[in-house]
Amino acid sequence: MPIPNIINVQRFSIHDGKGIRTTVFFKGCPLACAWCHNPESQDFTPQILFDSNKCCGCGACLQACDKKALSYQNGKILVDWQRCRGEACGFRCEEACIHEARFRSGKQIPVKELIKELLRDRNFYEESGGGVTLSGGEVMVQDMDYLLELLQKLKKEEISVNIDTCGECEFERFEKILPYVDTFLYDMKAYSEGIHRLYTGRSNQRILENMKRLSQAGAKINLRIPVIIEVNGGDEEMSKMLNFIKENIHVTQVNLLPYHKAGSDKWERLGMENRKVFCPPTAERMEQLKQLWQSAGIAPVYIGG
Amino acid sequence: MELRGMNERIRKLRQQSVTTQPRLSLERANLETDAYLEYEGTVSIPELRALSLKKVMENKTLCINDGELIVGEKGDGPQAAPTFPELCCHTLEDMHVMNDRDLISFKVTDADLELQKNKIIPFWEKRSIRSKILKAVTPEWKDCYESGIFTEFMEQRGPGHTVGSENLFRKGFLDYQKEIQDAIAALDFQHDPEAMAKKEQLNAMSICCDAIMILGRRYAAFAREKAEQETDEQRKKELLQIAANCDVVPAHKPQTFWQAIQMYWFVHLCVTTELNPWDAYSPGRLDQHLNPYYQKDVADGILDDEKALELLECLWVKFNNQPAPPKVGITLKESSTYTDFANINTGGITPDGEDGVNPVSYLILDCMDEMRLLQPSSNVQISRKTPHRFLKRACEISRKGWGQPAFYNTEEIIQELMNAGKSIEDARKGGTSGCVETGAFGNEAYILTGYFNLPKVFEITLHNGFDPVSGKQLGLKLGSAEDFKTYEELMDAYKKQIKHFVDIKVEGSNRIEAIYAKYMPAPFLSIITNDCISRGKDYNAGGARYNTSYIQGVGIGTITDSLAAIKTHVYDKKDLSMKELMDALHANFEGYESVRNMLLDRSPKYGNDDDEADNIMREVFSAYQKCVTGRPNMRGGQYRVNMLPTTCHVYFGEVMLASPDGRLCGRPLSEGISPVQGRDSKGPTAVIRSAAKMDHISTGGTLLNQKFTPSNVAGDNGLENMAHLIRSYFNLDGHHIQFNVVDRQTLLEAQKNPEDYKDLIVRVAGYSDYFHNLSRALQDEIINRTEQSF
């Protein structure tokens, strides 16, 4: 596999595990969740995001684009997204746009360089009990040599690492990285296979199986559930999820993450059809669900990251 | 933590304090003029100053507000601001401006104008320190001053910037007077050529002891008088207790918690009536000073937490009742606020190195939380020994969004002080005053002399020493922008210009210090500042144990980003010619939008933990710091730097063209050591790491502002994160950090509908202020500080 593309290295991440952390967002994901807040994280290759609100129609990008993906109509720039994607380009339109309307998502960063960036906030990690979180997209499906080198170096530097994963990969991959990981932030979207397949495009059988095996291997698991009323926010599906966890998994913490609409304009910027918009759960409903999980007595339950 | 909530008494006093319109009070000026008419020419200058203070204390209007437990006002009532014509004699026009201006106004009556016209102006106009200064400085100094290269603190206000020590709470003024008499008795008229001058100075101090004791006796009598007329039994009892307190203090050492606070307040009134020193005065480490009284009174059963808190809150109202002395002109621009910067330090460590947090520390935090007053400025000192509980409680108050308390690093402060030659014990007793200025409390006169405009000096460097705004040749002729073939040549020229302007500033300040030493001694302040009595020397003449003069650097973010942009585009990438850059600056980027975007978005920026930009910051800071530090002042001490702006970054921006970092003409500079507004995009840890690359320990204080959205610091996790950020910054030897926790939307709303947001307090720069009291430019500037949200 090629060197992974990284969307962003975000310092002062305070919602991805204990303390002050730096989170690396890898590009590419095996799932395609309908509610995804970061749709640019689904594709494995770099992409241009185009914010038409910032575009003044100056046309500097037309000259720069060597794939002839851009055209000019009625003072507006039109994007032929088929052409824009596909074969890698030089992303010269981003450089050409001085209005920041065109933004490249996805960049390969050599491990050595990434480590340097991740160590910058070491004193904050040490003070707060934080560290590094590898997230995405999906980190577990990225190039294993790259990941192992990264994880081994972080371990050597005594930096705590969390892995934020959807769980959809061969279990051998988990086995390989297990010694270097402090905590898994493990996402669970649904228990029922049909629901999972409908909204994410994939079965969840391997995801649930991997979770069990990780738990048996003694891994520390923080369960993270995006709460979407239409998908898993009803009593029936939520109870199924709860029962599965109760019977099979040792979790140290449960986070219920209420769906919000913040990501919806990104679909447009990627030239993708905006997927279904869901209803954000009410505060009352979140509180009910929190009670439900709490009453199971398996681990502390929190609303939000 | 459950708050007790202000009781009815405090609520009323607070209400009176925050709703009363500030006004001038000419009583002090009038009495002082009488004293000069009576004594001038018959006594020495120090004695004349002392007799003036005595005259004021003998005759000033007394005031006991309904319900208050701590008594005494600087003017004749709350929000009445005395004037100091011996320093700055206001013209009638000045007084009209003060009355009419929208911001920081002071009401002036017709009677005031009459008195000013007929008595004050004729007597003081030519004698004032301001007119002496303008006569004494060089034409170069005046040109630089008028062009905004630097400001001058001592032109309308006296040197001060100092803070009390534990002595205030351990001695009465009879004790001080005895020390003074002993010092007089020990003078050596056989051998010491200065013996006579010392005697005059010590006599003056002794007269000042009388002055404060007269004030105490008058208040005792006044309280008894009021008690006699009082029908409410409870209040009558309180008034009699106030009288009894004033029988003890200030003549004798306080015996109770209540008396200790009253003692401090009398001292505060006398320091700020004698002259109008910058940053008023402060009790400094108040929790440590009051703790012995708290412990004793609680053990004796005469004090509980509720009562102690109420007394502290009465003191807080007293501070807030005193607006900063009225300022005009450039001095108003550099410090555009009613806040007078009395800055109380809570926490830290004890003189023998133990954790300094005690029960009074927590009461002071509760007091801050309940009172939410602009004054006193309240801060916490956080040491490695500070309990997490204390830090968290302070964070809990800070995240409410009004900027207090600010956070200071005890270990770093101690290193700063020791690096500047203080003993370990004096360093541990020290702290910060004003905005962020480090001092050895009770032992040091650390005078701020003015702000220094680092980006303006660079603008002049690019124009061959010529100031394109004032149209004057202010700097050295070292070549125009296009003559500098390499970045190093440019940097070298900039450093030479810095030295040139620091030379001018220091020469002016030395003259001004000598004027104060000769004509404007402060014998009262000298009594309570070690070692003025034993040296027989005035505070303003080098009598203190330590004597430091500061020049405050402003705009480090702007200058760093400017240099980084030039280095990147003109010298390294060569995708922009110096000529095109200069044309763009002269055109205020009109027609050069793409050049501006390149400078703004495609250049390294300070505040992002980007070593390229941050190394430039270090180089500029170090050049400035080395140029200033160690120069001798006129009081036997040295010049040093600190890095803070108050509101001067707005004024300094007004006197400049557009700058190479993409800043538009007239817009504010960066403030303190914060990044340029909105240019920090990598979050607070990156800001902190960039800021920590400055050598804080070589300064006398730095100021870092951080704005958060409320969601960022929500919940227990939010508090923990705030605490961790503070500790991490302090582990990196950061000096100070303060937080604004208000979302952008709220600020925009408040700007649109000021009437609905009268109570919105925000952190400005080392102090808090009402948002509606800020100039439009400063409001915009605060809105534009990057809001860290993740």
Image (cartoon, coloured by chain):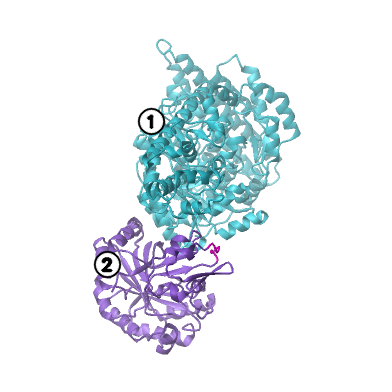
Q: Spot the purple chain and give its letter.
A: A
**Bounds of the magenta segment:** A53-58
Where, by quadrant of the figure, is residue A188 drawn? Answer: bottom left
Q: Do tag 1 and tag 2 residues touch (Cβ < 8 Å)?
A: no
Q: Amino acid type of disc 1?
A: Gly
Residue B186 higher or lower than A82, as above or below = above
- In this rendering, which labeled residue sits more in front, label 1 or label 2? 2
**In the picture, residue B93 is in which quadrant?**
top right
Q: Secondary structure at mark 2?
A: helix
Instruction: Name the chain under label 1.
Output: B
The residue closer to the viewer here, B53 or B304, is B53
- Can you tell which mark lies on residue A151? 2
Number of callouts? 2
Please indicate, yes or no, whether residue B439 appears anywhere in the rendered image: no
Residue nearer the viewer, B659 or B529: B659
Specify few, some or many for label 2: CA neighbours under 10 Å numbering under 14, 14-19, or 20 or more.
many
Give the number of the disc on residue A114. Answer: none
Residue at image location 61% in from the left, 21% down from the top: B127
Q: Residue at x 52, y 36 (%)?
A: B281
On the picture, is A240 further left or further right than B249? left
| Amino acid type for the residue under numbered disc 2 | Leu
Residue at the extreme top: B190
Q: Chain of mark 2?
A: A
- The residues tagged by marks 1 and 2 sit, at their Cα atoms, a distance apart of 50 Å
Q: Residues within 10 Å of mark 1 (few under 14, many from 20)?
A: some
Residue B630 is tagged as 1
Principal SS element in the magenta part? Answer: loop
Q: Chain B in the picture: what colour?
A: cyan
